[in-house]
Image: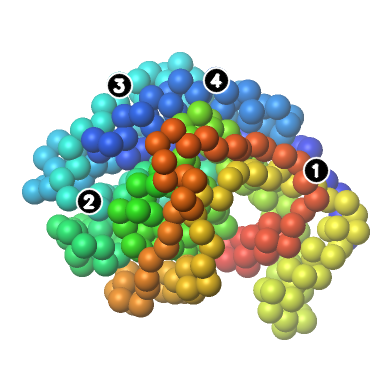
Amino acid sequence: MIYQSNPASAPLDIVFLQDATESQQPYIDAARSGITQICNTLLSGGKVAPQDIRFGLIAFRDHPPQEHSFNIQEYPFTSDVESFTSNLAGLTAAGGGDDPDCQSDALSAACKAQWRDGATKVAVLITDSPPHGIGENGDGFPEGCPLQIDPLHVATSMAEAGITLYVIACEPTLSQNYKRARDFYQGLVKKTGGKVVNLRDLSVLPTLIAGSALEAVDSEIYVAKHQTEVRSIANEQSISASEISLKLHKNFVAAGIQHSTLVVDNVCEQRTPGGQNVDIWFNAGNLGEARNKVEGNHVLEKYQAPGAEQSAAVETQLISLTQVETIVQKCLVRA
């Protein structure tokens, strides 16, 4: 097998799952005003052509009696950037009812969206609250979505369909107001090979969205190139995913393979129990298996003050072991 970086162009479908409850107007406005920057960043590496990018939007609030306006509003994929920007501009943040919202419904809608075959498929969830059913106080639907949509099950389906989920966590609200939400989201995205990305400074939102998509683009390029090899090693040598990742990473590093990497300030303190919580959510097949086993986390003091600045950038770096582990996971989970 020849190991080399691949600059080939690939179609990109990216859907915004936008929290539209009352606290979210600044985030909606920042996404709308940052569309041009997002597009420019996506195009800068030469791996995505302008005509190959499509944007979709799914706005969400909550179910009655918590919220009576809508649970989700869907806007189909479009390559017309002005049309997509108009959809965001017409979205007004209001209501929401209790603290958790219907992220599960939005995730389910994203999983069923009209994705293109062969495209890099990215869902970006922007929110400052958790879905129903993870064990937070004041949850009007403590057993989960009233439509029986389990987000952990949906994430598994997304992974099998080749959809990578990124969660942009609006901090410090998410971690200060909810003891389980952040670790839940980290376990959720891990199922799809995605990440939770901290957002404390609205000015970096376009970079976070574009950087997440570019990470996924590179990951998908390497999945396409190495899926047969990874599956062959797994089947013929009967070794674990971790061992495959170590072997593949060694080969990638020796060949100087590079990968787009979103570099962003870490807003939350890293705690060992937090990592355990993430694994609990990741390994659970449904919410009921995990909700009573997890604890909380903490926002770093310098990011708790209003107006705290944050840095974010997209860099091309030597591929990391974590990125290779994501590639291997994707190779093995897909049909």
The quadrant of the rendering that contains the N terminus is: bottom right
Q: Is residue 333 visible?
A: yes
The quadrant of the rendering that contains the C terminus is: bottom right
Which three-letter amino acid code belongs to the residue tagged 3? Gly
Please tell me whether mark 2 sits on a helix, a strand or a loop: loop
Q: Which mark is on residue 90? A: 3
Residue, disc 2:
99
- Quadrant in which residue 243 is drawn: bottom right
Which circle's residue, 2 or 4, is located before the other in the chain?
4
Task: Give the left or right position of residue 120, taking residue 295 as reference.
Answer: right
Q: Which mark is on residue 6? A: 1
Residue at the far top: name it: 82
Which residue is depicted at the point 25% across and 53% down? 100
Residue, disc 4:
36
Label 1 or label 3, whichever lies nearer to me, is 3
Measured Cα–Cα span from mark 2 to mark 1? 44 Å
Q: Position of residue 144 (x, y in %)?
A: 23, 63
Which three-letter amino acid code belongs to the residue tagged 2? Asp
Please tell me whether mark 1 sits on a helix, a strand or a loop: loop
Which circle's residue, 1 or 3, is located before the other in the chain?
1
Out of 82 and 198, give the one closest to the viewer.
198
Task: Give the left or right position of residue 265, taking residue 29 as reference.
Answer: right
Q: Position of residue 147 (x, y in %)?
A: 21, 57
Which three-letter amino acid code belongs to the residue tagged 4? Thr
Label 3 or label 2, whichever lies nearer to me, is 2
Which residue is depicted at the point 26% across and 50% down? 102
Question: What crowding class fits label 3: few (fewer than 14 Cα within 10 Å), some (14-19), or many (20 or more)?
Answer: few
